[in-house]
Amino acid sequence: MLPFLRSGLTQLTAYTAHTETLDQQALVLDHLDTNESPWDLPTTVKQTLAQVYQTEVAANRYPDGSHTALKREIAEYVNESALLPDGTVTDHHLSVGNGSDELIRSLLIATCLGHEGSILVADPTFSMYGILARTLGISVTTVGRSPQTFEIDLSAAQTALDQTTAPPIRLVFVVHPNSPTGNALTDAELKWLRSLPQNILIVIDEAYFEFSQTSVVKELLGHSNWVILRTFSKAFRLAAHRVGYAIAHPEVIAVLEKVRLPYNLPTFSQLAAHTALRHRQDLLASLSDLLQQRRQVIETLSQYPCLQVFPSDANFVFVQFDPMENISNEVMLQKIGTDLKQQGTLIRLISGGLRITIGSPAENERMLGRLYDSLLRSGLIS
Ligand SMILES: *Cc1c(COP(=O)(O)O)cnc(C)c1O
């Protein structure tokens, strides 16, 4: 241990999203493990972006550190997609981050740093909340979910809020719909969130909004302690560019602006987000095909009695072994993961199950064939 480091950092390990190196990525692999869009930007859109870069960007100048133009376009999209009148959500309700990951960290810094607060999450959920909290020395209280529906154990959550002190819970993270389980917030969960007091900030991560088309944005303006997070990394096909945004009360936004780095978003990423927004009708038109693919994947996987396939409001499906089948879970999951990887499909082993991103029709077909082979060879189907 280096003697100048904070003691809490020794137990932490660096986050690795992809286990393969760039060299291995050159092999043709189907990436059904990170919930990205299977589609790159259309060539014409990329050409537009390249053209703007060539003719209008001064590479020697710092980026626009205020993101004002981008925020105005995001506001327009947010209003439009929520059927809210123009000008309801404005640039004052928005902060733009280097991915929503940056916004998650900013929210932690703004509320909990210096042992002033801790966070609450319901597992299984997006791992980044806990990971980023721990790097900042912020403690994480975890409650469970129903094993059948993955609804948050609300009584455990309420007890955690009531009983956690020194420091108290200041930040609650929920995902709508949740990853890795694909379920949107229920009426009961929403009712509970509405009941929480003003001294707790509620973060509702809507990374998968474009797939679910369910959002709390209409309600957000009535709650000064709610924040919605969105991202360009999924439906907008811009994972390479790292752009996310927060929607919240202007006072919360002002704080996020205070704690972020001055030039957090490179010029090229800002341009990419502008361009994607301007082409949103085209980019988002592909979503109905993707949802159709999701139905087919769920239907096919549901035929196997050894599997329990959960409904999904997002661009992935979560699958576990049927508990009645008495399958040695971790060993078998590893085996299936390895089988699929060897044949060229990456999926995510997580929370005692498989999270499979919906890819292109060809990728999905290959995945289904490879999974069938693996189940057959493992004796799980005949
Ligand atoms: C993918 C994902 C994000 C996106 O993170 P970025 O940093 O914007 O790429 C955020 N939240 C959840 C729950 C996700 O699954």
Image (cartoon, rainbow, N blue to C red):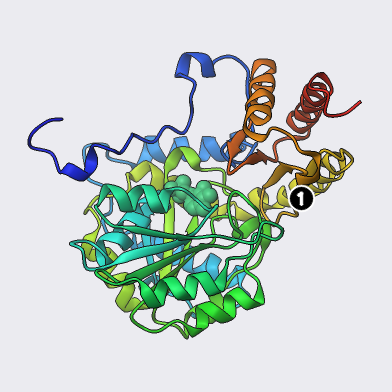
Which quadrant is the C terminus positioned in?
A: top right
Which quadrant is the N terminus positioned in?
A: top left
Residue at 63% x, 17% y: name it: 28
Q: Where is residue 89 in the image (x, y as percent from the top left)?
A: 47, 76
Residue 228 visible, this orientation: yes
Q: Quadrant of residue 65?
A: bottom left
Residue at 65% x, 61% y: name it: 146
Q: Which residue lies furthest to the right in this view?
A: 382
Mark 1 sits on what residue?
291
Q: Quadrant of residue 354?
A: top right
The three-letter amino acid code for the residue at tag 1 is Leu
Q: Position of residue 160 (x, y in %)?
A: 42, 70
Q: Using residue 234 as the reference point, say whether residue 102 is left or right of it.
A: left
Q: In front here: 165 or 12?
A: 165
Q: Dot 1, crowdedness within 10 Å: few (<14), some or many (≥20)?
A: some
Q: In front here: 355 or 31?
A: 355
Count of picture labels: 1
Determine whether 321 is above or below 275 in the image.
Answer: above
Distance from mark 1 CB to nearest ligand 1 atom below 8 Å = no
* Mark 1: secondary structure: helix
Q: Where is residue 156 in the image (x, y as percent from the top left)?
A: 51, 70
Residue 87 visible, this orientation: no
Q: Where is residue 375 in the image (x, y as percent from the top left)?
A: 80, 26
Q: Which residue lies furthest to the left in this view?
A: 4
Residue at 21% x, 37% y: name it: 60
Q: Using residue 91 as the reference point, say whether residue 217 is left or right of it.
A: right
Determine whether 142 is above or below 371 in the image.
Answer: below
